[in-house]
Image: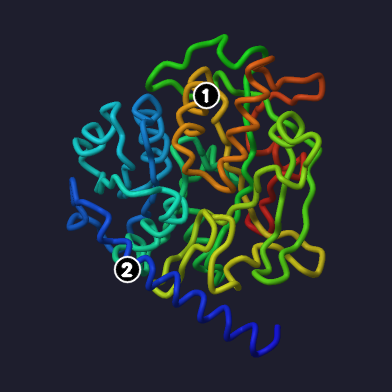
């Protein structure tokens, strides 16, 4: 990378950090329990809107994994989720009625909270429908992974987003609050993924899966990105650039081995496609607060009105993380 490009990226990172400081004015503190955070706590950061039905299991899942404190930004919910979060003893929550789109789809808000509270902590940034799976997660807590990353001087950990879906119509089996959504959405595409390298930010760019196969079959280049770097040993100088797809400094995006080996990685089981999805998609399409004029939600609305199912004869039923490693969707690398 040339000196001018390097300087340009440093300037861009500075702009994102300054922007996050400015955007803090849009956040209203509802419950601030950050005083109880211990120096070695694992932290989770999340933006949400009207996800009350998902929150009980989401919190349970990550508490069992070892998260010590949760940070939420609630974007003008009206389903009771803000009150629910404010009542949780290990949650700090802020609310805002400001534009999700103008906050770079929530990135500015979380960049501010991470700058203020996450310095020196391992920080996991996920959505309410994303569930991290990592090597040995069935027998080891998240702390075991972060301890190994610390010992290996690794500051970031990648996880491919894996879209999960049920067999049959998406609206066939109602989801109940507190239920594991993977009990319903337990199928995924084991292949049909493409991967390329972003030379500016050095991150990998992954597309494919059912959203590409069903919603963007004619224009796969417009399918959503599936590459994420959700777990980072945070420093107040860092900033996410685009969701958790990439961040600066760009060395944090180099979560792969350029010489042909494998680095440890995980998977985010993405339980978006439940019976609640059609109503959620219609709401988000009307709000028009998502990327590229909500082109993704326009594709959802158009396709699901005819046949709301994603399962096909090549679909694979989820078993565990070892299955995902065998399929090449994640790796334990040299972590034994």
Q: What residue did someone put label 1 on?
A: 277
Instruction: Name the quadrant containing residue 37.
Output: bottom left
Between residue 165 and residue 307, name the one nearer to us.
307
Where is residue 66 shown, x and y percent of the image? 39, 46
Where is residue 14 shown, x and y percent of the image? 45, 77
Q: Is residue 62 left or right of residue 27?
A: right
Query: At x 70% / y 55%, what residue is drawn?
Result: 205
Q: Is residue 287 left or right of residue 109?
A: right
Where is residue 327 shown, x and y percent of the image? 77, 39
Report crowding for label 2: few under 14, some 14 to 19, many 20 or more residues within 10 A (C-alpha): some
Between residue 280 and residue 119, name the one nearer to us.
280
Report crowding for label 1: few under 14, some 14 to 19, many 20 or more residues within 10 A (C-alpha): some
Between residue 72 and residue 8, name the one nearer to us.
8
Q: Secondary structure at mark 1?
A: helix
Query: At x 57% / y 78%, what residue is drawn?
Result: 9
Q: Report the residue that reaches farthest toward the bottom.
A: 3
Number of numbered discs overlaid on the protein picture: 2
Disc sitting over residue 35 in the figure: none
Disc sitting over residue 21 in the figure: 2
Task: Examine the rendered structure and indicate whether residue 240 appears above or below residue 126.
Answer: below
Quadrant in which the C terminus is drawn = bottom right
């Amino acid at each position: 990378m040339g000196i001018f490009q390097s300087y340009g990226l440093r300037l861009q990172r500075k702009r994102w950090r300054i922007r996050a400081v400015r955007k803090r004015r849009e956040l209203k503190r509802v419950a601030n329990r950050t005083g109880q955070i211990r120096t070695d706590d694992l932290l989770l950061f999340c933006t949400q809107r009207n996800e009350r039905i998902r929150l009980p299991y989401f919190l349970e899942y990550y508490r069992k994994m070892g998260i010590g404190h949760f940070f939420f930004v609630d974007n003008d919910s009206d389903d009771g989720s803000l009150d629910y979060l404010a009542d949780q003893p290990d949650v700090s929550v802020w609310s805002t009625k400001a534009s999700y789109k103008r906050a770079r789809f929530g990135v500015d808000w979380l960049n501010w909270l991470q700058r203020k509270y996450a310095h020196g902590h391992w920080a996991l940034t996920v959505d309410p429908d994303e569930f991290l799976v990592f090597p040995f997660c069935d027998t080891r807590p998240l702390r075991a992974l972060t301890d190994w990353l610390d010992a290996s001087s690794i500051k970031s950990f990648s996880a491919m987003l894996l879209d999960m879906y049920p067999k049959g119509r998406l609206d066939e089996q109602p989801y109940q609050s507190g239920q594991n959504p993977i009990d319903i959405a337990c199928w995924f595409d084991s292949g049909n993924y493409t991967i390329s390298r972003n030379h500016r930010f050095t991150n990998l760019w992954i597309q494919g899966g059912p959203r590409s196969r069903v919603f963007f079959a004619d224009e796969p280049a417009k399918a959503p990105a599936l590459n994420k770097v959700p777990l980072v040993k945070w420093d107040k100088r860092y900033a996410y650039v685009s969701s958790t797809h990439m961040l600066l400094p760009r060395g944090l995006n180099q979560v792969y081995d350029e010489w042909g080996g494998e680095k440890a990685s995980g998977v985010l089981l993405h339980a978006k496609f439940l019976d609640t999805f059609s109503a959620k998609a219609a709401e988000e399409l009307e709000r028009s607060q998502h990327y590229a004029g909500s082109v993704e939600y326009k594709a959802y609305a158009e396709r699901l009105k005819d046949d709301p199912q994603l399962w096909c004869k090549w679909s694979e039923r989820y078993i565990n993380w070892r299955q995902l490693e065998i399929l090449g969707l994640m790796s334990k690398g040299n972590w034994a």
